Amino acid sequence: MTPESLLEAGTRALARHGDLRTSREHFAQAYEAAQRAGDVHTLVAAALGAGGVWVHEHRTAAEAELVRSRVKHALTLVEPKSDLALRLRLRLTAESDYQANEHANILELLDEARKTADPIVRVEALSLAHHCVLGPDHVDLRKELAAEMIGESLRSERQGDLMMALLWQMVDHFLDADPHAVRRLTDLQERLKHEDHLAVRFVVSAVEVMLAIRDGRFDEAEQLAGTSAQLGAEVGDVDATAWYGAQICAIRWYQGRTAELFPLLDHLVHSPTLSTVDNSFFSALAVAAALSGDRRKAQGALAMLCRRGLGALPRSSTWLVTMSGVADAAHLLDDVDVAREVYEILLPFARLPLMASLAVTCFGSAQHPLGLAALTFGDVGLALTHLKAAIRDNQALGHWPAALSSRRKYAEALERAGDVHEARRELATCAQEAAALGMSTPPDADLTVRREGRKWLVRLGGRSVLVDGGIGMAHLAVLAANPGREIDAAELVAGTTALTEEVTAQHQLDPEALRQYRTRLTELRGRDLTDGEQAEHDWLAGEIAVATGLGGRARSFSDSGERARIAVGKAIRRALSVLSSADPVIGEHVRDHVRTGRRCCYSPK
């Protein structure tokens, strides 16, 4: 094929069909053929076309530098004041601004483009500028750019321009929680039936996954995510892998299976296909690691995000999701300082939904992580305000799993505030909503609690979580191993031999457990303690005092049923708090089916 025919094929694939992969191949071939033939016009047009329809399409350093150097070279071959030179400058500036998380330069060039007579120059400038302001600070600006682009696309007479403009408008509506967002999506879906555009269709397919997750249709969402990822790979969209990973993270999060993602995320955070301004997978890794019991990995991922202050992280299209993950990780790790910092940073965006990239995943209202952060640094009243707002906003979004998650945390905050009656009412509503979504645990699901090293593995049906634990988790292990059987609190404390061998080996007065408690208490004494460490110190001292008698000998509760009742009740409540933070569904099940008192029982039915 001649350089001209290769260029024509590339232009048709990109501008009409949105076929990123095919267009790249043709533009690369056209550039090389034009270079050999000395065809300046074709070489310049091929260099420009290789940039694609998005910003930052080329992710590896070598690939990005090759495209950038060709555009720079092309710029030296054209008249500096020409429209073609302006288009080349727009591409270079957009790439530079995007990776630097800036937008001033591209907006300045957009003003220059508005003065030209060529609508193609204006529509390209608007699209590139729009891509550079996808962060949460620019909601109104994006809407203005998208509306202007629709008008210009009608003048450019290129089919792909209108599809891209309508796509940007649809994305803006979702990112702003606009009630007409689905209407914009439906309009685009209808147009795609008659005028297919592969790049746009891929984004639409990803948004459809997001909506299925919002609706609680997890099995369908997972199937749609796989189909969407396959389409993205065929189209040649570099975000196909990251979007699929984000969608699976959202599904597993609301299924209570985030810990399963730890190995995947540990690998994905280093993928060269991720955008240079995307930190969301680091925060997801911190959450998954914390839930899977790897506290060191969780703290490391969180520290990486915080090393220069959270305010230094680029406010990209994934920034809100990143901050939400930081709030979750800080809550799981009881990191009060990080919780305060993320609260202050997130507060101005409380009304927005937590969405990633082009609305391809959604984690509900930003009010939810604000409530979590407040709960972490101990302001229960503030947490209640945000979590109540989160329930309302998630309902308005039609994000039913997120609304359920916020209601569970709201119930926890109510209980911390001492309003136990209202907390129970909220938990009852949670159970009804979970059942309606098919997210409740089957009545016959088995609860198992067993020690895994220094952690406790808790399973309920298809859900599982690995948590820290103390004496309360040992009591739960005994009760779960004896469903329906009433066990005297004194027996739980003493570790009766009437219980199964595996479980009773883990009873409260295990010498190794006492040794570990005393060792940790010694470590904490004699130094300035944080609020969290002071709480841990007091708890350890109390548990050791309850569990031992004069001289540090194991205490017998055979003559003190009341003392045993109090000790067991307190220990199980602490274990419930840990479980509820790690997996609200399991925590709620245990709370509803474990009875404490002089005689304790786990009744799964």
Image (tube, grey):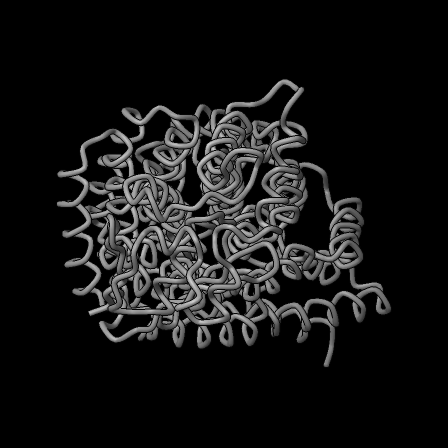
Q: Quick one: which residue is furthest to the front in this view?
A: 559
Q: Quadrant of the C terminus?
A: bottom left
Instruction: Answer above or below: position of 401 versus 374.
Output: below
| Residue 578 horizontal/vertical position (percent) | 42, 46
Q: Give the residue drawn at x 66%, y 30%.
A: 522
Q: Is residue 545 left or right of residue 51?
A: left
Instruction: Answer above or below: position of 425 versus 505.
Output: above
Q: Give the residue drawn at x 45%, y 55%.
A: 474
Q: Is residue 189 left or right of residue 66?
A: left
Q: Can you tell which quarter of the image residue 251 is in? A: bottom left
Q: Give the residue drawn at x 41%, y 58%.
A: 253
Q: Quick one: which residue is furthest to the bottom in this view?
A: 1
| Residue 514 horizontal/vertical position (percent) | 58, 45
Q: Can you tell which quarter of the image residue 533 is in? A: top right
Q: Can you tell which quarter of the image residue 373 is in? A: top left
Q: Residue 323 versus residue 554: which sits nearer the camera? A: 554
Q: Quadrant of the N terminus?
A: bottom right
Q: Is residue 117 visible?
A: no
| Residue 266 horizontal/vertical position (percent) | 64, 58
Q: Is residue 318 left or right of residue 144?
A: right
Q: Residue 579 versus residue 198: which sits nearer the camera? A: 579
Q: Residue 544 versus residue 578: which sits nearer the camera? A: 544
Q: Is residue 224 left or right of residue 91?
A: left
Q: Is residue 465 visible?
A: yes
| Residue 512 horizontal/vertical position (percent) | 62, 51
Instruction: Answer above or below: position of 195 versus 353.
Output: below
Q: Give the residue drawn at x 57%, y 62%.
A: 452
